[in-house]
Image (cartoon, helix red, strand yellow):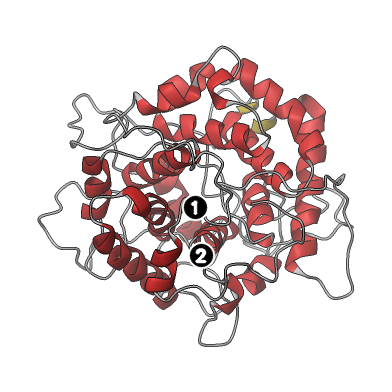
Amino acid sequence: MNTVRRGAAALAAATVLLGTGAAGAATAAPSPTPSAVTIPPGLYGTKDPTYDGVWRQSLAFLAQRATGYQPADRSVDWLLGQQCEDGSFASYRADTTKPCDAKTMRDTNATALAVQALGSVRRQAAAPEKIDKAVKAGADWLRGVQNKDGGWGYSSGGASDANSTSVVVGALAATGVKPGSFTSAEGRTPYDALLTFALPCSDKAGAGAFAYQPDKTGALLANADATAAATLAGLGKSIVATKASPEQPPSCTDLSKPTVERAALNGASYLAKALARTGHLALPPMPGATDTTEQPDIGNTADAVVALAASGATKEAKPALDWLEKNSAAWAKESGPAAYAQLILAARATDTDPREFGAADLVEQLNATGPAPKTPDTSASSTSDDDSGFDVWWIIGIGMVVGVGIGFLVSGRKK
């Protein structure tokens, strides 16, 4: 899951509607910048928020909480104000005085990440009860639009894809909900959906990888973006995951009866091999582009680092992190808050100080993209992904938790 992908959301949606399924819902491209953009008070970043306003705000919150900061109240209020009455979120609502209607394109990805982000800031927020209601409403909406196969598409009613399903799984896990209990009317879980996107180890071109969606012929094509997302989701982890212990070299194994945990580890094996070639993932040229040269895919490389560390393959992730330290500065400056957050989470996943990321202080750079956050909470910076800054009483209060631990997760892991 490339977390700086929201600028390409419209392209992704068009890809799904056309049935190509070849591209993931994510490309590491910044949002388009029109000649004049009015940035609402409280929103992070200076680029056009049409396609990524809620996404980048949510991601910034998660990175700030991971480093001990609490977003400013007006930033939290802005995100709360983006929610529709039914609990969903669109990618961005320019006029929140108008209620959401049938023309409002609900965004499962934005909704899931907003649910996770709001829950993470609840502990120190000015209106915790309001956040409780927003999180529960968002989770209820996601349950209501779950597809028959157990997964989710980018928009309500869209065909399930690996990326969207994984974002929802990560948010559920981070908010204390057991994703395996989130069943469709047909009794399918999100993990059932994810397994349909997994390529076997016998696949020569993409052994162990995940596809975004089947293509027109029903074939599965390896997609690094989808693989990073599904690897985390298969392990029951979210994008704020930290490294698992003990470390284990990734390997690919086909089971007679596939499991989502094994498929996730197979995905880590694919990512490790892909990164080993050049130290980073590559971004294929856009359809119709005159320049067909592959470019480094910085965003998905950061995602792959998190996924590998979460699977216990921190050693295999380290060279890619070193590459990011040397090559991500210009990209992050151009892309904005989501990019800084993405790099912070990659650093955190490998026990690397994001304040000394090459020559950059990623935390300072992220905080400078929006309203100044509140004084750092030293207790939050060491928070594991099992609570991600969540207040235990909040979890109990909204009645969403089925247990402090999630029994299906890999033993010994640290989220």
Sort mark 2 into few (<14), some (14-19) or many (20+) by Cα contacts within 10 Å: many
Which residue, as the protein is rendered here, is positioned at the far left?
Answer: 97
Residue 275: percent from the left, percent from the top? 76, 33
Between 237 and 123, the residue placed more toward the observer is 123
Residue 120 in view: yes
Q: Identify which amino acid the numbered label 2 is placed on.
A: Leu
Left or right: where 408 falls relative to 388: right
Residue that numbered label 2 is attached to: 172
The total number of labels drawn is 2
Q: Determine which quarter of the picture holds residue 213.
A: bottom right
Which residue, as the protein is rendered here, is positioned at the far bottom?
Answer: 186
In this rendering, the answer to whether 348 lies above or below 209 is above
Left or right: where 117 falls relative to 268: left
Q: Compute the Cα span from label 1 to label 2.
A: 27 Å
- Could you say whether the residue bearing mark 1 is in a helix, strand or loop? helix
Q: Identify which amino acid the numbered label 1 is placed on.
A: Thr
Please identify, in this view, whether the residue under mark 1 or under mark 2 is nearer the observer: 2
Between 58 and 195, the residue placed more toward the observer is 58
- Residue displayed at 49% across by 52% down: 15
Between 106 and 378, the residue placed more toward the observer is 378
Residue 340: percent from the left, percent from the top? 47, 29
Q: Determine which quarter of the picture holds residue 64.
A: top left
Left or right: where 279 falls relative to 82: right
Which residue, as the protein is rendered here, is positioned at the far top?
Answer: 359
First in residue order: circle 1 vs circle 2: 1
In this rendering, the answer to whether 176 lies above or below 121 is below
Residue 15 is tagged as: 1
